[in-house]
Amino acid sequence: GIQVEQSPPDLILQEGANSTLRCNFSDSVNNLQWFHQNPWGQLINLFYIPSGTKQNGRLSATTVATERYSLLYISSSQTTDSGVYFCAVTPSGGYQKVTFGIGTKLQVIP
Amino acid sequence: NAGVTQTPKFQVLKTGQSMTLQCAQDMNHNSMYWYRQDPGMGLRLIYYSASEGTTDKGEVPNGYNVSRLNKREFSLRLESAAPSQTSVYFCASSEAGLAKNIQYFGAGTRLSVL
């Protein structure tokens, strides 16, 4: 099946710093999503981004489908950004089977 | 609008006991999913239901059964719980379609099997 690799696995930031999280995938995809899991375990969909660039406030994401990677940018980080960020992909031809990466654990310290 | 609701939030079982995890969504979504999340392994798909009346295996279906009771509800059953099934279980739903599959998650069920 499709492989999803996220980097870095762990990240500690000072409040106000910027960061880039990366997601590499091994095959063509119909769908790519970024999720944030907060410290209480709730999973929130951040972006649906099979290709192109999207922005939502301090967060933005870019997916280059032809090169099989996606980037999540966090600017001016806040302590509420702490948690785990997951990339999840749906391979072309298997549109129901979503595969998650193991995530990037982010800690933003004051 | 409640979104995706899972019950119970916490459960402790003894090895060999059975239980059913309930999931309901009020977004009129066609597709529903069950995942398990273990430390260091991200989320893994157990079963999914593309539409009412259909179910299919995901990555880790062994030891589980599912029922798509109607469009709103999708339950996950453990017939004979094992310690290896200690995990956090998430239900999700989406509109689905050929490529668009934005998933919305419930709050999770934390299950311990002793």
Image: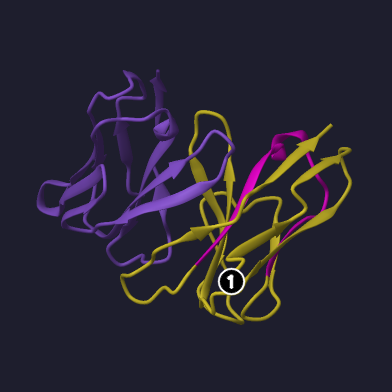
Q: Is residue B85 magenta?
A: yes
Say which element carries label 1: loop
Residue B37: percent from the left, percent from the top?
Answer: 57, 40
Q: Report the chain shown in purple.
A: A
**Is A97 on the left-hand or right-hand side of A75?**
right
The tally of labels here is: 1
Q: Dominant secondary structure of the magenta stretch?
A: strand
Q: Which residue is mark 1?
A: B55
Please tell me which residue lies in front, A104 or B45: A104
Q: Is residue A42 left or right of residue B111?
A: left
Q: Quadrant of the N terminus of chain B?
A: bottom right
Q: Which residues are magenta?
A: B74-93
Say which quadrant the C terminus of chain B sits in.
top right
Can residue A2 be seen at all in this image of the molecule?
yes
> The residue marked by circle 1 belongs to what chain?
B
In the figure, the yellow chain has which letter?
B
Q: Is residue A51 above or below residue A101?
A: below
Picture coordinates of residue B2, whole percent (x, y)? 62, 66
> What residue do we see at 41% from left, 23% from top?
A107
Q: Based on the picture, tell me whether residue B21 belongs to the magenta stretch.
A: no
Q: Considering only vertical position in the picture, is B10 above or below A54?
A: above
In x, y percent, where is residue B102? 39, 64
Q: Quadrant of residue A76?
A: top left
Which residue is drawn at the image coordinates 36% and 65% (left, top)? A94
In this picture, residue B96 sits left or right of residue B3? left
Please name the amino acid that badge 1 sits on. Answer: Thr
Of residue B93 and residue A39, the one placed in the foreground of this image is A39
Q: Relative to residue A48, is residue A69 drawn left or right?
A: left
The residue at the point 26 percent across, 44 percent down is A59
Using the rendered image of the protein, determine whether residue A102 is visible from the camera's viewpoint.
no
Which color scheme does this rendered protein use? by chain
Examine the image and state in which quarter residue B103 appears.
bottom left
